[in-house]
Image: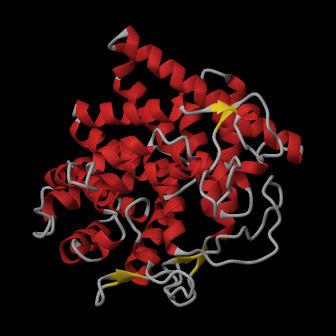
Amino acid sequence: MKNIVLFAAMFIFGVNVMAQKNWKVLFDQEYSAICTSTETIREYYLNKSISGDSFDFMTISNILDALQCMYLSTGEDTYRNDLVKIINNILSTAKVSKNIPGNIYEYKDNFLSWTSKNTLNSYNNEAPLYEGYIFRFITQFIYNLHQSGWTSLSAENQSWYNQTLQFIEKNIWGKWISRSNEINKKPYTIFLRTRTHTSSHWAFIGFFLKEITVDPLIRTQCIEMHNMYDLLLKRNLKSNPAVPQAYVWNCSWDDVSGTQANVVDEVVLQDVSHGNHVLSYLTVSKKMGNPNWSDSEIDSLCNTLKLVVYNKKEISFADMVDGSPSLSRPGWGNNQAEGWIKLSWFDKEVWNIYVDFAFRQEYGIMRQQNMELQYYANLLYTEYLAK
């Protein structure tokens, strides 16, 4: 919290003159823009949310983060109502695992679930990755509704909140805990797996779920799991030899001793694009007062962005956290709108980078990567936090 307070003071007295764009207007224009011949971008996401295809959860998660930033920044019902609609659609498509047609998941059971319909990615299989991807933002949203007092405004609101929370507790958290116990004889192995970014989704869910669950066992599980994730990630974060005030890290776990993560066979450097998920969890949990992360560690992550990842001359971001390019996914480092951009909550120089990027790449990289909505919404939320 200290970093956010300091940044707010700097923000008020020294906002970059470029930061005059109305992020809300830009978001609303883009959100209502025509996407295809038959639907707007808003309608595209609403239609996507009724597909019942878990692979779509990764795409839908982007708009959930964006709408949540818009709602938190403005308090406008339209954003909250769309979030509720999308969540209702997703939950309505869940089916009993063992009754899903064509489901090839080996451990089918009586929990509600989904399968992927993408022929190249977990086709006809259940995937914790996709569920973690989207339910982190759903869990955060219902936490925010609870904190804001929305649930106490009507019996209908309270009922919706209760049903959504119970679904998460049983058919998301409880389901994968049960399956991990069956498969690995340990509750958190499916969550922690072998990668920083895939497991960050579950640390995110656990961090918020512990705040709203009334089940003492679930709360204990959430605390144990996100603390275990924090320990694993801390072991990975190393001082960059070329830029000691910045970090470099592998996305494969360096040391799994004393945890329930899987042992890693191949060491893999963290790519910037997937690093978004790590930063999304770290920034949100730090803002929420996670004692596992210090101001100095957040400063080092900001330095990683400012001094290593961002290329001011080319107005672009490196593909790998050590500043190197990626041979397999060149240009993917420019995906910044989910996690890295949230470092702007803590550092004015980081804020200036993203405002500069928005001005100079609005119709270039931003449009190519389809990240305008999430980008605008996150910038608006940073402005809101700085007030």
Instruction: Out of 354 and 100, give the one closest to the viewer.
Output: 100
Q: Is residue 219 visible?
A: no
**In the depicted structure, whether residue 23 falls above or below residue 299:** above
**In the depicted structure, whether residue 276 falls above or below residue 306:** above
Return the x and y of residue 77 as percentages of the image width and height: 24, 30
Q: Is residue 377 visible?
A: yes
**In the depicted structure, whether residue 221 falls above or below residue 193:** above
The colour scheme is secondary structure
The quadrant holding residue 293 is bottom right
- Lateral position of residue 10 relative to residue 338, left or right: left
Return the x and y of residue 278 as percentages of the image width and height: 54, 61
Task: Give the residue at x 41% y 59%.
Answer: 338
Task: Give the residue at x 40% y 82%.
Answer: 307
Return the x and y of residue 234 as percentages of the image width and height: 64, 63
- Lateral position of residue 13 relative to residue 245, left or right: left
Return the x and y of residue 265 as percentages of the image width and height: 82, 74
Task: Give the residue at x 78% y 46%.
Answer: 105
- Lateral position of residue 356 relative to residue 221, left or right: left
The quadrant holding residue 345 is bottom left
**In the depicted structure, whether residue 364 falls above or below residue 168:** below
Q: How many marks?
A: 0
Q: Residue furthest top?
A: 155
Instruction: Out of 25 and 353, give the one closest to the viewer.
Output: 25
The quadrant holding residue 84 is top left
